[in-house]
Amino acid sequence: MKINNFALMGAGGFVAPRHLKAIRENGQNLVAIYDPNDSVGIIDSYFPEASFFTEYERFDRHIEKLRRKGDGKGVDYISICSPNYLHDAQIRFALRADANAICEKPLVLNPWNADALKAMEIETGKKVYTILQLRLHPSIIELKKKYEGLKPKKKHDIVLTYITPRGKWYHYSWKGDIKKSGGIATNIGIHFFDMLAWIFGKSVKNTLHYISNEKAGGLIELENANVKWFLSIDGKDLKAGDKTFRSITIDGDEIEFSEGFTDLHTKSYVEILEGRGFLIDEAKPSIEAVYEIRNAVPVGLKGEYHPFLKNITGN
């Protein structure tokens, strides 16, 4: 495998260590890192010799200097682990710097941003890759094989439940600002929506039943399945003793995929470096789904809805 030069934007966040690990374990070279926050001691465990910048302008100048040196000194890939609302601008920066972009979910917040990035790909000749790691999970791959190509007489009945409590800090951070994060469906749900659409077909209709700052529930009608979903960061929704709860049932059968997550980012980088990474068109359906949720008006408990909503709304 060719050794490429990488830069990384957003080293201080939750997901950055997975990217640092993936770059190192694939034998790649990380030459520059940017984060306005200097609490990034995690870098010492991976690439202590990488140049580090807390000012965007100096990082920009450094990347440009490397590009102009030529002779293999320029950056080939820029990995983006920043807050959601920065993804679009930082992907554009990567493409203008003559580098491919590798960006965490959500790739962008709005569907039209994805279309504009596709135009930039054509202009620059570079690619925009996204991390859709659940598609590389062995259990999910087997699930796709099981249902792919089947034309059910009746749509499959799927119930998705994900409760992952967050503290008060969440609401004071960028994650609690819907304009910056995209809201709860984007923050903690987009990878599930992507995975289910990958297996059961694109979204046909999207209904929102309930939403607040801490939880939401609705129904996504896919080509071959109806998905009743509930997402929450409120610990009160958990049973006593539980720290988190994740469940997906298909026609009443529980799908088990609690293990096998540790190396999925490393696998994602293998796919990208070998030219098989997930591109903009593959990310766009889930971007459209969460955009619709974010802008929908809740209809209340009408039609098919997630059973947890009955307790929350008091109906």
Image: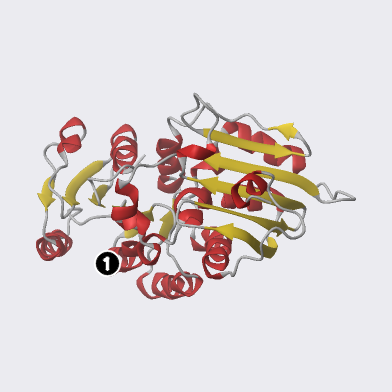
Residue 136 position (above or below residue 259): below
Residue positioned 11% across, 55% down in the render: 54
Label 1 packing within 10 angstroms: few (<14), some (14-19), many (20+): some
Q: Is residue 224 left or right of residue 92?
A: right
- Nearer-the-camera pick, 238 or 256: 238
Asked whether the viewer can see residue 47, the reply is no
Q: How many marks?
A: 1
Q: Is residue 31 left or right of residue 130?
A: left
Residue 182: x, y in percent? 43, 62
Residue at the extreme right: 153
Where, quadrant-wise, is the N terminus in this rendering?
top left
- Nearer-the-camera pick, 179 or 298: 298
Residue 161 position (above or below residue 211): above
Disc 1 element: helix
Residue 134: x, y in percent? 54, 41
Residue placed under numbered mark 1 in the picture: 93
The amino acid type, in three-letter code, at marker 1 is Phe
Residue 264: x, y in percent? 46, 36
**Quadrant of the image occupied by residue 165:** top left
- Nearer-the-camera pick, 18 or 190: 190
- Nearer-the-camera pick, 314 or 148: 314
Residue at the extreme front: 314
Residue 241: x, y in percent? 49, 24
Q: Is residue 285 left or right of residue 109?
A: right
What colour scheme has been applied to the protein in the rendered image? secondary structure
Residue positioned 85% across, 50% down in the render: 151
Residue positioned 23% across, 51% down in the render: 7
